[in-house]
Image (cartoon, rainbow, N blue to C red):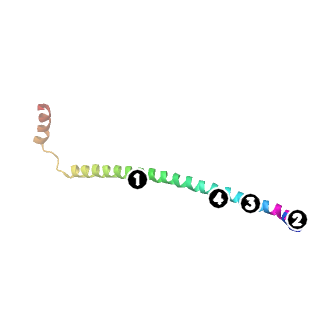
Amino acid sequence: LFVVARHAEENYAERQEYLGSLSHGADEMCAIHEGLTEGHRFYKVVLTELRKASEKGAEIADLREAERATLLRRMNEPPPTFTQATAQPAAAHAA
């Protein structure tokens, strides 16, 4: 009985060291998990903001394309004749 107790006493420091390393490993794993979870949330927010910016950019590009098409259409129209040019201001004053 004393031999067994003495053997167990000799291993006590090793067991304490092993349990300490397990505890440290568990703490590190929890910290890594927390960091990954936080990073996942961060990148979800970033992705949402990038999608919004992309949609806004697409809307602006579509508006500019419509403006361009209107301008090209106006440039390709024949210039107004003298009677058309003088008739428009008179119509505007009548309203």
Magenta stretch bounds: 9-14
Q: Residues at badges 2 and 1 in contact (C-beta under 8 Å)?
A: no
- Mark-to-mark CA distance, 3 and 4: 12 Å
Say what amino acid the circle numbered 3 marks. Answer: Ser
Dot in front, 2 or 1: 2
Give the mark, 2 or 4, whose residue is nearer the N terminus.
Answer: 2
Say what amino acid the circle numbered 2 marks. Answer: Arg
Dot in front, 4 or 1: 4
- Mark-to-mark CA distance, 2 and 1: 72 Å
Dot in front, 2 or 3: 2
Q: Residue sitting at 46 percent across and 54 percent down?
A: 47
Q: Residues at badges 2 and 3 in contact (C-beta under 8 Å)?
A: no
Say what amino acid the circle numbered 4 marks. Answer: Met
Q: Position of residue 26 (x, y in %)?
A: 67, 58
Q: Is residue 36 above or below residue 5?
A: above
- Mark-to-mark CA distance, 3 and 1: 48 Å
- Badge 2 local density, few (<14 within 10 Å), some, or many (20+)? few
- Mark-to-mark CA distance, 2 and 3: 24 Å
Numbered tag placed on residue 6 in the rendering: 2
Q: Residues at badges 2 and 4 in contact (C-beta under 8 Å)?
A: no
Numbered tag placed on residue 54 in the rendering: 1
Q: Regarding mark 4 in the picture, which secondary structure is present there?
A: helix
Dot in front, 2 or 4: 2
Q: Residues at badges 3 and 4 in contact (C-beta under 8 Å)?
A: no
Give the mark, 2 or 1, whose residue is nearer the N terminus.
Answer: 2
Q: Residue 5 occupies which quadrant of the picture? A: bottom right
The residue that mark 4 highlights is 29
Q: Position of residue 81 (x, y in %)?
A: 12, 44
- Badge 3 local density, few (<14 within 10 Å), some, or many (20+)? few
Q: Residues at badges 4 and 1 in contact (C-beta under 8 Å)?
A: no
